[in-house]
Amino acid sequence: MRILIIEDDRETATYLTKALREAGHVADHAADGESGADMAAEGGYDVIVADRMLPKRDGLAIVSDLRKEGDETPVLILSALGQVDDRVAGLRAGGDDYLAKPYAFSELLARVEALARRRRPGEADTMYRVGDLELDRLSHTVTRAGKPIPLQPREFRLLEYLMKHAGHVVTRTMLLENVWDYHFDPQTNVIDVHVSRLRSKIDKGFAEPLLQTVRGSGYIIRDASR
């Protein structure tokens, strides 16, 4: 899943971003309400996690404006205000769920995943398929020909991005920015190492290789038998 975190507390934001990425998700962060609203308006997120009290723009105002624009992206509101009236105000503003601080990350993750499952059919792809390879974004499972393939979180994110763009060449720059969150070239072979490991897991032992290197361009995943 791709998740937007709108949180002004740096320590909380760092913790949440790191934990969600370790859980295999793509997590972007906005440090104030104004930048958060701009990022949310760009779309492409499966779930938004927004603090209620933010500088520059209130979290409830962000949610309300999204709903007025017809954006139905699920929103989990975080707030130190946990009274009944506070929760009611958050839900009436357009929030889909409300979690009072302090909270356990395991509960937040479960709520985020529940919100993603609750989306209407067609709003988001939760299952990717290439040939007999299947990736379930919600359960974080991968199978090929029905056989489970265990992946590390980074390998899962790499495969998810490749399968999302199945049939198209994915460049190294695209992978650095969207899988590793680098906006510069680290001058390492980190991509080659992870692609090699991923290829050995999804292609080894199968007659038809799916993950291919496009020399000088990047990588592509496709069912060559079709």
Image (tube, rainbow, N blue to C red):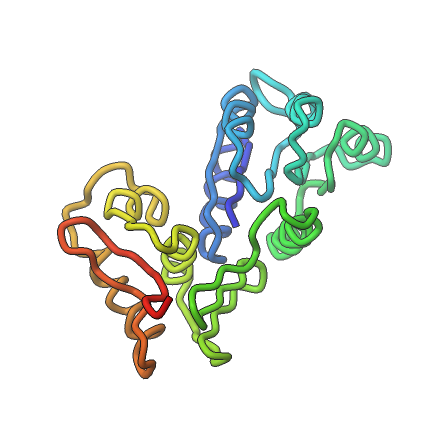
> Which corner quadrant holds the C terminus?
bottom left
Is residue 159 shown above or below 46? below
Q: Residue at x 70, y 27 (%)?
A: 67
> Is 18 positioned to the left or the right of 98 in the image?
left
Residue 187 visible in this rendered orientation of the protein: yes
Q: Residue at x 28, y 74 (%)?
A: 200
Q: How many numbered circles are shown? A: 0
Residue 30, position as x, y percentages in the image: 49, 30
Residue 78 visible in this rendered orientation of the protein: no
> Is 160 positioned to the left or the right of 108 in the image?
left
Viewer-closest of 9 and 58? 58
Viewer-closest of 121 and 81? 121
Q: In terms of image quadrants, where is residue 139?
A: bottom right
Q: In terms of image quadrants, where is residue 130?
A: bottom left
Residue 27, position as x, y percentages in the image: 47, 44
Q: Residue at x 52, y 24 (%)?
A: 32
Residue 177, position as x, y percentages in the image: 32, 42
Instruction: Residue at the far right: name it.
Output: 84
Viewer-closest of 78 and 110? 110
> Is 212 positioned to the left or the right of 75 in the image?
left
Is residue 128 shown above or below 143? above
Q: Residue at x 46, y 79 (%)?
A: 145
Is residue 209 shown above or below 6? below
Instruction: Residue at the far bottom: name it.
Output: 205
Residue 70, position as x, y percentages in the image: 68, 27
Instruction: Residue at the far top: name it.
Output: 56
Instruction: Residue at the far front: name it.
Output: 226
